[in-house]
Amino acid sequence: MKETIISTIDELQQTFYDISQYIGNNPELGHEEVKACTALTNKLAKHNFEVEIGTCDLATAFTAVYDSHKPGPSIGFMAEYDALPGLGHACGHNLIGTMAIAAAIGLSKVLSETGGKVYVYGTPAEETTGGKVTMAEAGVFNHLDAAMMVHPYYCHQKSGRSLAMDAIQFEFFGKSAHAAAAPHEGINALDAVIQTFNGINALRQHVKPDVRIHGVIPEGGKAANIVPDYATAQFYVRASNRKYVNAVTERVKACAQGAALSTGARLEISNYEFSYDDMVTNEVLSTVYTQNLQLLGVPAEEIFEDQGDHGSLDMGNVSQVVPSIHPYIKICNEYFVCHTHEFREAALSPQGQEALILGAKTMALTGYDLLTKEELLQKVKDEFSK
């Protein structure tokens, strides 16, 4: 039956190429991915998936299921398809979304024999207010026995960890005045922002090496001769696990509170994007994926261990509620990092399209192993329960 899966994906590869190129050449920002959502769900519907668009009241999210109407596990594939502002699909989400439906369609062709269900979840806005966060909090994934997705990269890399992340905004409210004639009448909101940065920079010496804190000043005043009465700072606070991020975030907030106190500005704190949890890879499931990647012709020496350099993912939130993997697949022969023009072109290249098919086959074969090997599935569940 593995041959059926592989031959199905091969027979449809031109269709999958076309969808990936269409999404890649029509980039849409998070929660605006109407064209991508339509292209992916139309193809799933043609292959007898039941499709619901608007999952969790997210207009461009979707849930698609192929039900064998026989007992068996439920396997979920995660689709991403949002682009980056000014860069387009420079993170290869045109490949991710298409890989997910290709894997699901290939696996669906053997469900009459294996039993079980195959799900595809369309998860918008991974780059900002990740759809997986909302869906995980709503319990959308709780019924799954396993969840997986594959991300494009410059090499093959096993699923590993990611950084948990909080997105914190500080708004400082001061009092405007003439900066030369009556500066003593003003309260400088920009000074509070600058002191916040200085406090955070001092904090860096006293946190663990895995912590990343980086920020910008979206609003810092209107003119040099006016004391700024309003200024904002936005920070990402990241660390290797949710517990430590929570602790560091409180210390970052204290830096802003101290800055407000010393300048006399009023402070408001909010989250400007959703918080992401750290990715917890299911190692049993990851091993099966790696074995299938080798089965499809990738030498073991070309599959690298995770280096822990992937920032934050909303797949982390999925991994907290269901056994999950998030490996990386090679789409280029040069060291192109994500979120660059070079990586965008690699995601549209013939090598990128070949990687799409390889990733789809590997995920589909991994799903098949879970559907047909009860002992393996139990090992996956046992690891997750620990």
Image (tube, rainbow, N blue to C red):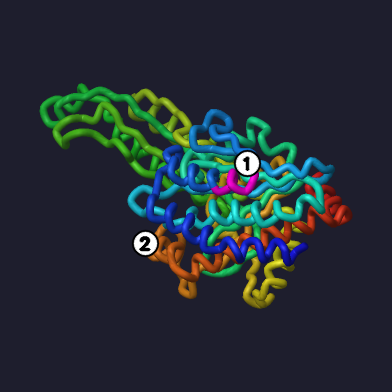
Residue in the image at 46% along x and 74% along y:
334
Marks 2 and 1, the one that precedes in the sequence: 1
Q: CA distance from mark 2 to mark 1?
A: 32 Å
Residue 66 x/y as whole percent: 69, 44
Relative to 180, is 354 above or below?
below
Magenta stretch containing residue 115, yes or no?
no
The residue at the far left in this view is: 181
Magenta-colored span: 43-49
Compared across the picture, whether 76 is left or right of 84 comes to right
Residue in the image at 63% along x and 41% along y:
64
What amino acid does circle 1 point to?
Ala
Compared across the picture, whether 101 is left or right of 332 comes to right
Relative to 118, is 174 above or below?
above
What amino acid does circle 2 point to?
His
Are the two marked residues, 2 and 1, in contact with CB atoms closer than 8 angstroms?
Answer: no
Q: Which residue is mark 1?
A: 64
Determine if residue 347 is in view: yes
Residue 331 x/y as whole percent: 51, 68
Secondary-structure class at tag 2: helix
Magenta stretch containing residue 46, yes or no?
yes
Determine if residue 251 is in view: no
| Label 1 Cα neighbours within 10 Å, binned few <14 / some 14-19 / many ≥20 | many
Residue 199 x/y as whole percent: 43, 41
Residue 341 badge? 2
- Quadrant in the rendering for residue 142: top right
- Quadrant in the rendering for residue 48: top right
Residue in the image at 64% along x and 43% along y:
49
